[in-house]
Image (cartoon, rainbow, N blue to C red):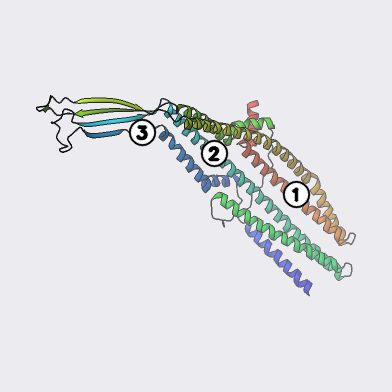
């Protein structure tokens, strides 16, 4: 009685899981281009990065702008006892003036260049972020596909185990089987249901992550993933590396940082030269006629220039050294990135080749043979020509090979997404374009 009750619970759980799965399948298939477009349009981190780029871009004109001119008004050489009397002293005057600070020639252009290169660097950093976001969406997408496929083969195996359990119970009832086989069948089915529960939880986690990447509510349902074929990359590692040097946004970003550091170094050298302040003053004078002096009160003009003396040499030398180190740092980071890209391309191409060969081997050889072996074992088990363990072994072999097939297909597409992020463009589209150019 206890055995039948346990088996009833198992069958009920299996039915409930299958029902939930059928509800999921009612959702429309998710299309990868639409998901990527949604992520690029809605992801809040990407929006923050774009705003930062716009913020830096708005600083370019500010960097080269002159300081505001200074306007001056003063009463000059007036008596302290009566400051508004201007006809007692020949040197009394009302003065209005204007002055303008001008940096040494070339400094403004270099400041603008530093700001422009920094803004351009962050512009490419935003494009790099888009590439990374696309890669993460694609990886999540193909992980969802693999989980859905594994759930499907789990359901198929649950149905198979139900049939096997029915046959085992029938054989036991007529004295051709043993009770431990019933327990083993029930245990295998329970283990399969546990695997199904874990896969369903994994799918929920992947859904939540996909919704996070797309910038939408975490409980938004994600439909099944559309089927796909494995595209082939026909370009060599050298060709892909050349494409990466031209297309990868992060390379362009670091190149801008190198240019920024070089402009900063030139600007630091300009700091050894003075800045100037030009001034113009106009004095309004009243006629003076006293016992001491007589003056017609002609108005006067003053022109002047002041400049600083670059006396703090140590500070300026350190500014120059700072810019030199910044240039070295950016250059070496660029070299390191190029080495990393080359290594990633070679490793990823090897992984793609391995996964493609495994997929072809599973499809054309291993899985068909495993299916035939399982079918033969089922027929033989019904007529008591093989034992229950042999049947379970055949079933587990097919289950394992099918999982490995789907894992290889999903891993192939994820590696392809990683290669796209490494070179900065779709490697399959790059292959087509390269072929057209050669023709």
Q: Residue at x 66, y 56 (%)?
A: 202
Choose the circle earlier in sequence order: 2 or 1.
Answer: 2
Point out the image quarter for the N terminus: bottom right
Q: Secondary structure at mark 2?
A: helix
The CA distance from mark 2 to mark 3 is 31 Å
Residue where numbered disc 3 is placed? 67
Which label was assigned to residue 393? none
Residue 408 makes an appearance in the image: yes
Q: Which residue is mark 2?
A: 125
At mark 1, the secondary structure is: helix
274 on left or right of 375: left
Q: CA distance from mark 2 to mark 1?
A: 37 Å
In front of the other: label 2 or label 1? 2
Residue 383 occupies which quadrant of the picture? Answer: bottom right
Residue at the disc numbered 1 = 404
Estimate the spatial distance between the alpha carbons at disc 1 and disc 3, rounded to whole Å. 68 Å
């Amino acid at each position: 009685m206890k055995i039948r009750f346990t088996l009833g619970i198992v069958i009920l759980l299996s039915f409930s899981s299958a029902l939930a799965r059928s509800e999921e399948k009612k959702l429309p298939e998710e299309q990868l281009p639409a998901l990527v477009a949604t992520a690029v349009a809605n992801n809040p981190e990407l929006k923050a990065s774009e705003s930062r780029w716009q913020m830096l871009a708005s600083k370019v004109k500010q960097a080269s702008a002159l300081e505001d001119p200074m306007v001056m008004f003063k009463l000059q050489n007036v008596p302290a006892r009566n400051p508004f009397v201007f006809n007692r002293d020949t040197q009394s005057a009302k003065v209005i003036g204007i002055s303008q600070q001008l940096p040494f020639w070339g400094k403004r252009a270099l400041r603008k260049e530093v700001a422009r290169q920094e803004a351009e660097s962050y512009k490419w950093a935003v494009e790099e972020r888009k590439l990374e976001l696309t890669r993460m969406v694609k990886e999540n997408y193909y992980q969802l596909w693999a989980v859905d496929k594994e759930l499907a083969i789990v359901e198929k195996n649950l149905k198979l185990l139900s049939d096997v359990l029915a046959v085992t119970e029938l054989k036991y009832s007529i004295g051709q089987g043993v009770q431990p086989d019933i327990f083993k069948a029930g245990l295998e089915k329970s283990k399969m249901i546990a695997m199904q529960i874990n896969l369903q939880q994994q799918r929920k986690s992947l859904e939540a992550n996909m919704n996070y990447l797309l910038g939408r509510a975490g409980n938004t349902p994600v439909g099944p993933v559309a089927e796909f074929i494995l595209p082939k990359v026909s370009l060599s590692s050298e060709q892909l590396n050349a494409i990466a040097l031209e297309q990868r946004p992060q390379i362009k970003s670091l190149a801008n940082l190198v240019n920024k550091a070089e402009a900063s170094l030139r600007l630091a050298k300009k700091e050894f030269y003075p800045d100037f302040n030009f001034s113009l003053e106009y004095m309004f004078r009243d006629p003076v006629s006293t016992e001491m002096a007589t003056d017609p009160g002609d108005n006067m003009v003053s022109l002047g220039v002041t400049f600083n003396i670059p006396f703090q040499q140590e500070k300026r030398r350190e500014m120059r050294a700072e810019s030199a180190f910044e240039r070295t740092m950016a250059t070496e980071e660029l070299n390191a990135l190029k080495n990393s890209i080359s290594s990633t391309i070679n490793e990823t191409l090897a992984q793609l080749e391995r996964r493609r060969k495994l997929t072809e081997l599973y499809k054309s050889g291993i899985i068909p043979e495993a299916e035939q072996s399982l079918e033969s074992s089922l027929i033989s088990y019904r007529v008591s020509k093989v034992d229950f363990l042999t049947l379970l072994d055949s079933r587990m072999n097919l289950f394992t090979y099918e999982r490995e097939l789907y894992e290889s297909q999903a891993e192939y597409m994820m590696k392809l997404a990683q290669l796209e992020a490494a070179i900065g463009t779709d490697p399959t589209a790059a292959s087509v374009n390269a072929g057209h150019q050669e023709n």
